[in-house]
Amino acid sequence: MKAAVFHGQKDVRLEDVPEPEVRSGSVKVKVDWCGICGTDLHEYLAGPIFIPPAGSPHPITGETLPLTLGHEFAGEVVEVGDDSEGLRAGDRVAIEPVFRCGECAACLRGATNLCEKLGFYGLMGGGGGMSEFAVIPSYMIHKLPEGLTTEQGALVEPIAVGLRAVRRAGFEAGQSALVFGGGPIGAVTVQCLKASGAGQIMVAEVAEARKEKALDIGADAVIDSTEEDVAGRVRELTEGQGAEHSFDAAGIQETLQTALHATRKGGTVTIISIWEGPVQINPNDIVLSELNVVGTICYTPEDFADTISMLRDGRIETEGIITGRIPLSDVVEGGFEELVDHKDRHVKILVRSPE
Amino acid sequence: MKAAVFHGQKDVRLEDVPEPEVRSGSVKVKVDWCGICGTDLHEYLAGPIFIPPAGSPHPITGETLPLTLGHEFAGEVVEVGDDSEGLRAGDRVAIEPVFRCGECAACLRGATNLCEKLGFYGLMGGGGGMSEFAVIPSYMIHKLPEGLTTEQGALVEPIAVGLRAVRRAGFEAGQSALVFGGGPIGAVTVQCLKASGAGQIMVAEVAEARKEKALDIGADAVIDSTEEDVAGRVRELTEGQGAEHSFDAAGIQETLQTALHATRKGGTVTIISIWEGPVQINPNDIVLSELNVVGTICYTPEDFADTISMLRDGRIETEGIITGRIPLSDVVEGGFEELVDHKDRHVKILVRSPE
């Protein structure tokens, strides 16, 4: 079968690989759609970062590159291994691509996103969604309810990241929020804020296409830091108070520092982004304003399941964030290279596996 | 009357000043005891820091140095101005020394510790507790219940800082806590953790006298960063998990960074200290472990009142943190200079006003 295999920086190849065989505790899925994640792009441009390089196999999968990519995907079960109760061929499913060691304190309390050996299917091994078939641990499988397409199913993963961020923030209906970054994670955060009854959503973004997109999907205002002082503008928009919540989905020193200044006293700054290295902050900004600074990573199984429910009910709309649909055969040029050249135009490009 | 007046760095003078007169909305208090705060010492060594210098009057008091010091104090009401319902001569009282502008959003919701014009009686003007008499806004007055001495009353202020920190942390009975710094704020935090049913209290401290004191007042273990790796030792003491809570009462880059590493996934780092400037952190430490980083400043009126209740009930014991009692006449040598020379030996020196 065909699969998009990561060999190294700027080296993703569409290859013929053996079709995987179902094992006990797993199911075989015919992939329909798979999203290209910012993490995939990061690996393409500068990897291997999270992908285990030669000589350093991932502690759960035991694999190293070359590895099949794709961790935002959905499809249909075609074969079920032993010990996979409740699943059968024909089930349309989305994949929650987080491995579980099943032994650490985090896994034992259901916080699989904090597993000591944190690993992702389609990034650290196991197979991947940018292929025709994938054999997947049954615990990663979420059935899609009627009315939810596998195209929507491929968007559950990134949207679950936004839902967890909003939950970790302790966000309450009616509150105001400032989101730094209008890229894919910023966009899903805006959607989840809207679905959570946000009173006012402001997005700090500099790229024109992303500014427009942010307004399209629900932001009430966009603020361009190259044109105005973000914290000052937020104060104007919030009766002098600052935002009750800020979400940093940009992940640079400037956005975090601005978040600390643009958030009202007693408010919450939620950090969603992955960082390239240390940054400077003044802890007095946290102390004197009694801020809460909250980290959020991935999603728990509960977040993932609830995202599916919210999509099913139409509380989160997916059409607005799909900015491209390409066949698997075009994943390098129409996917990765398109994102390199025109990242700002896109939120989510979906890759269609061969029928 | 006599008062300890701050004129500048290393220049606190015991002076004769006019006895203050009661005004409407205030009461006149004969001071019994007043603690020397770390902030007072900081002002003595390097001030004016918070004390308004000449030309920059505080927005609420309109005052600049020279100013009478002392914001941790208690005494007896001797005269009551108009508009001071419920207070009368003879009341023994503790002073919650936070001014209120009464107009900002924080004041209006009772978060007077976050007042836009935050100011302290005995630091930014109004008078001070290191004197014989003080005239104090009635809203700052808390009556002491029977059985609670004015000596204990002088300790309410610093202990309320510890109580708020523990509350802001969302600390729950049975949880583990790591406190950075065994000075006055670290010590009251340990006491409030103990009173909150902490399962395990660890204190990171390097000074011998403070290490002993920490064990005296309730720490289960002390960890000396010059002798062992703090995060590693904490993991040993917590079944490999890290502390559920860390409290930074030391306020240097190393303690904050260590707190981020010594706190378990999903845990909370509460920052109590005031910082001299920016520090470097890696936000990935917050993101990948889903930490909560929480700022805490002073106390609200509710925290202050509840601290009094806890002292009355004996849930917080005060004797252990009093390390000196001196007369007001000795405040410079026996107070400030003693703390400069032997800071590590002391938690709280109390100053006795003339009878």
Image (spheres, coloured by chain):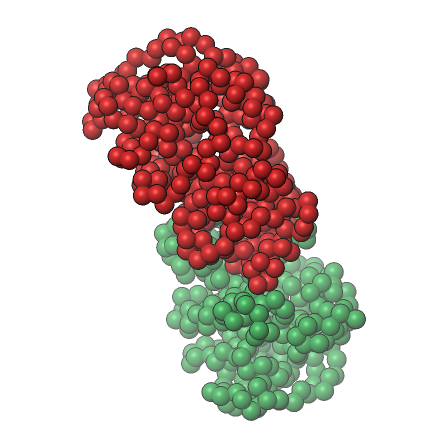
Chain colours: A green, B red
Considering only vertical position in the picture, is A176 above or below A129? above
| Nearer the observer, B286 or A336 | B286
Where residue B354 sits, quadrant-wise, is top left
Q: Position of residue A76 (x, y in %)?
A: 54, 84
Image quadrant occupied by the C terminus of chain B: top left
Q: Position of residue A91 (x, y in %)?
A: 49, 86
Considering only vertical position in the picture, is B20 above or below A38? above
Considering only vertical position in the picture, is A137 above or below B285? below
Which residue is depicted at the point 33% across and 13% down?
Answer: B20
Number of numbered discs: 0
Considering only vertical position in the picture, is B131 above or below B198? above
Q: Position of residue B129 (x, y in %)?
A: 40, 22
Q: Position of residue B102 (x, y in %)?
A: 33, 30
Taking the image as drawn, is residue A193 in sight? no
Which residue is depicted at the point 30% across and 28% down?
Answer: B93
Taking the image as drawn, is residue A111 in sight? yes
Image quadrant occupied by the N terminus of chain B: top left
| Nearer the observer, A298 or A209 | A298
Q: Residue furthest right?
A: A55
Which residue is depicted at the point 51% across and 74% down?
Answer: A153
Would residue B98 be found to the left or right of residue B259 on screen?
A: left
Would residue A17 be found to the left or right of residue B216 on screen?
A: right
Which residue is depicted at the point 35% across and 31% down?
Answer: B153
